[in-house]
Image: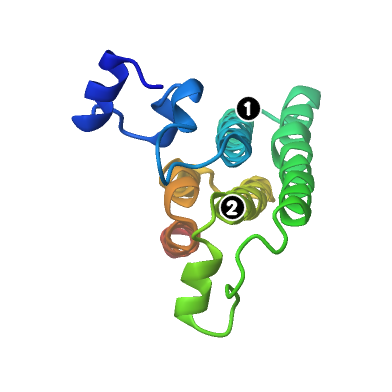
Amino acid sequence: MLDFVGASLLATNEFRTCSEVPWRWHHAIPGRHNRAHMDNINMAETAFSIVSIAAILGWMGLVVAAALRPGPVRAAILFCSGRVVPVLLCIAYVVFLGHYWGSTPGGGFQSLEAVQMLFAAPGKMLGAWTHFLAFDLLVGRWMVDDALTGNRSRIPLVLALPATFLFGPAGVLLYLAARSIHQFAVGSKA
């Protein structure tokens, strides 16, 4: 049975999410999720935090490595940030894909509505987020490698790396445009 304080909090909607309602109250609240479902959501939230932090560390490593002079330290940071972290994110994606397979009946890729249904489940959205993080980080590594090749400037990376982290393809377009403009400006001075 709900105690008086708990009942009044529920009645005034003081809880923002189901996860804030104490576990002992869930059985007394009609329509609330069961404990197994809430544990699954909490696991997805924890995994979301882990993959997000890993990606941020990877991006920070790319920024630091791009600023360093050639040598073993830069090579090690690039390897960890641009290869190890993305591979770990890819592994996490495959684990999420297997774990949440079939969790959204009716979801799929045949229409926008089916895709929306597919990503309505927290586990599927976690997989999609991890997919974005892994691929964007691999693209970031490509941009750093490209900028460090030959006589290319690292200046286009200043805005392009954060833009790619935040906006994916828009950051890649920014990098390619800035690289082209910089190459044109340097070529016209020669």
| 181 vs 57: above or below | below
> Disc 2 or 1, which lies upstream in sequence?
1
* Mark 1 lies on residue: 68
Distance of label 2 from label 1 (alpha carbons): 22 Å
Closer to us: 184 or 92: 92
Query: Helix, strand or loop at disc 1?
Result: loop
Is residue 13 something that shows in the picture?
Answer: no
| 107 vs 84: above or below | below
Mark on residue 48? Answer: none
* Mark 2 lies on residue: 136
Question: 74 left or right of 37?
Answer: right
Query: Is the N terminus in the top left, top right, bottom left or bottom right quadrant?
Result: top left
The image position of residue 65, as x and y in percent, is 64, 31
Closer to us: 67 or 40: 40
The image position of residue 121, as x and y in percent, is 54, 56
| 17 vs 5: above or below | below
Asked where in the image residue 189 lies, by quadrant, the reply is: bottom left
* Residue drawn at x 72%, y 37% as measured from the top left: 85
The image position of residue 157, as x and y in percent, is 49, 45
- Local crowd at mark 2 within 10 Å, few (<14), some, or many (≥20)? many
Amino acid type for the residue under numbered disc 2: Asp
Amino acid type for the residue under numbered disc 1: Leu
